[in-house]
Image: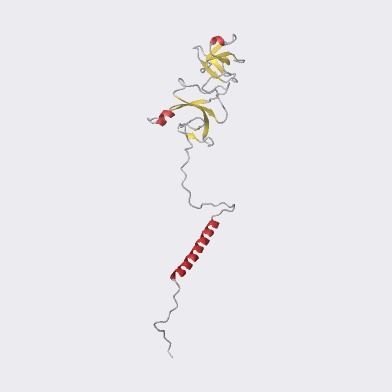
Amino acid sequence: MDEHASPGARRRPPVPPRVRVTARVAVLAVAVAVVALLLTTACRAPDGTVTDDRASAPVPPGPSPYGVVFLGPGDCSSRGPEIREVFCRSEKALATVVARHLGTPSSGPPCPDTTDFVLHVSETGTGARSRLTTGYACMRNLEPPHPGDPGRGGGPLTVVGDCVTASRAGEVTETPCADTGGRAPRYRVESAVQRRAQCPGTTELFVALGGERPVGCARRSPGG
C-alpha cells in the first residue's frame, strides 16, 4: 500500500534557525577570545610586562651642539687662521672660552688672569644673533704652554708675578721672568693695589694692571 500523508497529519517542526545562529556565534566568540589570547601572549615581554610594538611617535630633534652665542663660555675654538667653533674633544680644538663679554676689551669687563689670548668676535647683520655674538672671548689653551700664567711673558694681561721691562717713554713690555738675555732692566710685579700710595716703600715701578686693583707694585727682578 502506498504511503502518503494526509492533509490532516502533523509534520515534525524544523529546527528553529535561531538555534543554529546561536551556535555559530558561540563558536565565533571562542575563536576571537583565542586569537586575542595569542596576541597578548606574543606581545608579552619575558619579564611579564606588556610591550607596545607599534611604531613610536617621532622624537623631536635635540638642541644644536652649539649655543646661540658664537664661542660662548665653555666652547672651544679651532686652530688655523680662520677661527671656528668646534667640539672641545675634536683634534682641531685649540683653546676654550673662559669668559665671554660684549663690547671691547678696553670698555668691557677684564678677562680672567688665566687668559692666554683674546679673540675679537664680530658678525655682520642686524639679527639677534649678531647682537649676542659681537664682543670678545677670553681664551685659554687646552694644552701647554700657557703664556697667560704668571711669569710666562705673554697673555693679554699683566698680573702679579709677571715680569716687565720699562722703556724711556714710560711704557712697559711683558717679558718672561726666566729670560736673562734682555738688556733693559726687568721688574717683577709683586702686588696689586687700588692706589699707588698703597704700594710698599720698596716699589720701584708702578704698572697699570686694570680691574679692581689697577696698580701693580713692581721691584727690580734678580738678574734684570
What count of labels does the image hold? 0
* Residue lying farthest to the front in this orientation: 8
* Residue lying farthest to the right in this orientation: 222
Q: In which quarter of the image is residue 131?
A: top left
Quadrant where the N terminus sits is bottom left
Q: Quadrant of residue 205?
A: top right
Q: Position of residue 108 (x, y in %)?
A: 46, 21
Residue 207 visible in rendering: yes
In the image: residue 219, left or right of residue 120: right
Residue 78 visible in rendering: no
Residue at the image position 57 percent from the left and 14 percent from the top: 218
Residue at the image position 46 percent from the left and 69 percent from the top: 19
Q: Position of residue 18 (x, y in %)?
A: 44, 68
In the image: residue 70, left or right of residue 179: left
Quadrant where the C terminus sits is top right
Near-viewer residue (213 or 16): 16
Q: Position of residue 177 (x, y in %)?
A: 59, 19
Near-viewer residue (178 or 17): 17
Measured along the vertical axis of the image, is residue 59 above or below residue 102? below
Q: Where is residue 181 in the image (x, y as percent from the top left)?
A: 58, 19
